[in-house]
Every structure is written in C-alpha cells, then in structure tokens.
DNA sequence: GTGGTCTAGACCACC
DNA sequence: GTGGTCTAGACCACG
C-alpha cells in the first residue's frame, strides 16, 4: 500500500495502521466506495501479523470509516472523508502538543525549542515535502 | 516533586519518570550530590505504585544518573548533568521527528503543518513559557 | 532449561539467571538467533516468579545479549557471544578474587589456603568436570 | 581495627563484620577475655552505621563468640577460638565451593579454570601473603 | 501463545 | 526511615 510501519516509535502497530488509513482517506488517496487491501495482503506488505491488521480494520469499522461488504472486502464509507479530515488534524495536533509540552517542561533554554522545531521543519522540507 | 504524570499519553509511566528526572538534572533543578525523593514518597506524590518508581530509578541507576547510598537514598551522580543535557535534546528531538514525519506523510496541504506548528508554539509561549 | 537456582547462595535469583544465560551463550549452548525459554516457561521450570525471570531478561536486553521479537520471544543477539565470553571470565574472576582475598585476610596458616583450593579443585574434577 | 569492609562484594556488611571478627579470633589476633572495639568506635573506623555493627555483635553473641560485660563492653569468650577456627575453614570453603561450582557449570574450557585459579593464587602471594 | 507494564504487598539489609 | 528483592496477579498489545 502507501504507507509504512515503524515498530519502534512507541505507537502500537495497529494504531499506526488506523492512523495512516485515516490519513489516506483524508487526503483523498482512498475514496468512498474504494476497497482497502485485504487483511492478508496488507499484513504481507507491512510484514506484520494478520491479526494486527484485523484489529486495525475492526477499529476503523467501529469508527465508521470502513464498512464490510460480505464476501468482498472492506469499503471506505461515504462519511469517511469528512470524519478523517477532522481526525487528521486532531490526531496530529495531539501528538504535537504532547511533545511540545514535554519540551517546554524540560526547561530547554530560551529559544532552543524554537530552533529545534525550525531545524526539524527545514529538514523535513528539504527531504521531499508537503509543499 | 516538580513534575507530573499523564497515564494516557502513550509513554510508559516509568519512562515518563526517567525522562523528567533527566530533564530536571539537565536544567539544574537537580544537582549532583542531591538526593531524589524516596521511592515511597514519589510514588505517593504521583499516585503511582512504588514499584513503578523503583523501576524508573533502576533504569536511571543503570544509566549512571543516580547512584544508591545504602539506607539513605538515591543521589544524582557527578556525571549526570553532562549525560542528561545530551539526552534531553535527543529525547525531545526523537519524539518531535516522529510526529513531524507522520504529519508530513499524512499529506497535510501545503503550509498547513507549518501553520499548525506555529500555532502550537505560540500557544505554548502564551501560557508561560520557555523564555 | 540447562541450569539451576540456589535461593540461598547470596546472589539474587534474577542475577543467577542473567549469569547462567550469559554462561550458556559464552559456551555456545545458546547461539545467536536462538530463542530463550519464555518468561512463563522458565519461571515454571525454576519454580520462580515470572517477574523475577522478566527482570533477568530485562537486564539481558539492556546488556544487548537478548532482544525482543514482538509476540514471539527473546532472541540471542549477534553480538552476544563476544560479550558473554568476555563477561564470563570477568564474572567468575571477580567472585574468585573476592573469596581468595577474604581467605588471605583471615590469616589462614601458610599453605592452608593452597591446600583447600587444591582439594576443592580435585573434588570438582572428580565429580564430572570441566575437562 | 584490623579489617576492612567492601560494600560491593555482595556480602552484607554486618556479615562481613561477623566473619572478620571470627577470623581474627581464629588466628589469635583476638584472644579470649580481650574486648572488641565499642559499637561506636568500630562504626566510625569502618565508616559504617552503628546499627550495622550492633547487629553483627548481636549475632556474635548468639554464636557465643562474644559475651557482654555490663557497662564495660563485649569480651571474646573462652570457647571462641575453638569455634572460630572450625568456622573459618567452613565459611571460606563454602564460598570457594560456590564460585568453583559456578565456574564449572559455566563450561569454561578445559584447564581454563585451573589456570584462572593458579593465576589468582599467584597474584595473591605476590602481593604480600599468607606465607 | 508471547513480552511489557502496572499494582499490591511481602521480607530483608541497612541508616 | 531507605532501597533491593521477590511474589502474586492483573491488563494490554502483538502473533
């Protein structure tokens, strides 16, 4: 598919999958009516246990992002893009706030956090970027 | 003490403790020779199990940040400030890179991530801040 | 497994486990890539609490002798044999020096310590032995 | 007094004291009727907590090595030399057996243990020795 | 099934 | 009072 797993970033693997599916829907990479890869296929692709993918898909169904079509697969719902766009910014903002708060609480010297953030944003854009 | 635990932020409690102790040492709030709160005291204060604190203190000992003085308590080592200052920036940078990478991969529209970051940095500084 | 615990020999149980795992790696009984017994299994076998085994395994992970494979078990690392061979001799020498020093300080009569050591070495070899 | 404490050798401090008192009696450095240093004095000398010395003296009293003379101090008993000579060899042998057994179980290559023991015995004698 | 984390509570050695 | 060790048992994420 179109995304990657980092087993060491602290976020549970199944949650990395749900997040990235949501992001794909938010950005239009996955559209309503489209089918996501089968559990087995995605599991193979991500080199992950099928049960892990299955759990992620389960969560996405209860979030009404995916819905099962018997015998066929899991389909992106009509309402998914709206929900996912709202979720995307929220999910990212939450993690961002968490790390910035920790940084601030760590008493980094004045401006040091800003420098760090700027450097990392620059690094990101240099690499091939959002813009 | 001088810090707080968020049981729901995804980081293990014992690790939140190790990080914040390191930050306190890095910033000079805790100095070499000084004693950290006792296992029981900190556990009470943070409303956490003593063994959880003990585990955090154990890691800090194997990181040579704390050393035990039998029957007396745990003392910040001489080398701790150096190590902790190095660790602080690394620990924060790692989390920051992780969230920024995820944001970029989520295909946020051009400039949207920068706006989000700027907004959160501003919010942080407004609150009472690093500077 | 291939070893035994003596709850009364003064060495903490978790440390007896770490030492014996290291010895097993050093001697080639455990090879890189091989999995150690699960926490629960070893705990059952040694009639010890699983958390005690877990603690030992935790130390071995921070010593880079074992590494976790999620949901599968703990694997001997590539670098383990090298580290463990170095550690084995060191761990044994330290204990040996400690007891020999004490014996010497105890003012045992001339030659008595040598006799004692010889007798015990002989006894050891008689039993079924290093050689 | 005539001995030293090693806080890091795994033996409890109070037990290091009892052992060394016994060794001193066994070797004749301390004779029946002689008084051992007061709790406070020995504690100061060894840089150890008085309660630790007190516990050691308590054990030695219940082993009938020392006996209290009200208002005066603790005296080596008549029977102490006999008991202590017997204990000395036993205490040392036990530790020696424990380390040799561990070494053997560690599958050190043939002769390697003997070499190690010889080297350490030589080192000991070189330093200023029993003989 | 696996390890990781956390809680609750015990005993010990030492101050 | 202190930390160190151990036990018992819980829930979670992952395979």
Image (cartoon, coloured by chain):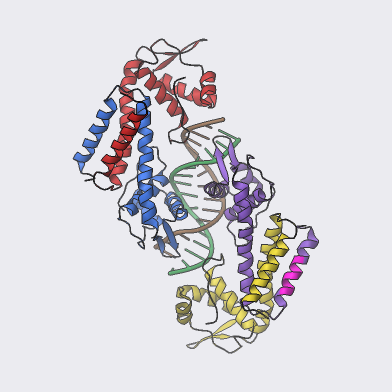
Chain colours: A red, B blue, C purple, D yellow, E green, F brown
The answer to whether one can see residue B40 in this image is yes
> Residue C109: x, y in percent?
69, 81
Image quadrant containing the C terminus of chain C = bottom right
So how many labels did they put on this image? Answer: 0
Using the image, determine if residue B71 lies above or below residue D63: above
Is A12 in front, or is E13?
A12
Q: Is residue A109 left or right of residue C65?
A: left
> Residue D25: x, y in percent?
62, 83
Farthest-out residue, front: A126
Magenta part, dominant SS: helix
Q: Is residue D92 left or right of residue E6?
A: right
Residue drawn at 56 percent across, 42 percent down: C67
User: Which contiguous range is marked in magenta?
Assistant: C114-121
Location of residue B61 (image quadrant): bottom left
Is B67 in front, or is A51?
B67
Farthest-out residue, left: B126
Q: Is residue B6 left or right of residue D18?
A: left
Using the image, determine if residue D61 lies above or below residue C69: below
The answer to whether one can see residue B43 in this image is no
> Residue A92: x, y in percent?
33, 29
Q: Is residue C80 magenta?
A: no
Using the image, determine if residue B108 lies above or below residue D44: above
Location of residue C121 (image quadrant): bottom right
Residue drawn at 61 percent across, 54 percent down: C86
Residue drawn at 77 percent across, 58 percent down: C129
> Residue D124: x, y in percent?
64, 73
């Amino acid at each position: 598919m179109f995304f990657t797993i980092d087993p060491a970033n602290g976020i549970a693997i199944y949650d990395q999958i749900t997040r990235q599916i949501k992001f794909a829907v938010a950005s239009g990479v996955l559209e309503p009516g489209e089918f996501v890869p089968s559990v087995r296929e995605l599991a193979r692709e991500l080199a992950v246990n099928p049960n892990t993918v299955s759990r992620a898909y389960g969560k996405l169904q209860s979030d009404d992002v995916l819905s099962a079509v018997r015998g066929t697969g899991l389909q992106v719902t009509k309402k998914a893009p709206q929900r996912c766009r709202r979720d995307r910014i929220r999910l990212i903002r939450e993690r961002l706030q968490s790390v910035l708060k920790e940084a601030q609480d760590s008493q980094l010297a004045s401006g040091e956090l800003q420098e760090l953030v700027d450097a990392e944003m620059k690094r990101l854009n240099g690499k091939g970027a959002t813009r």
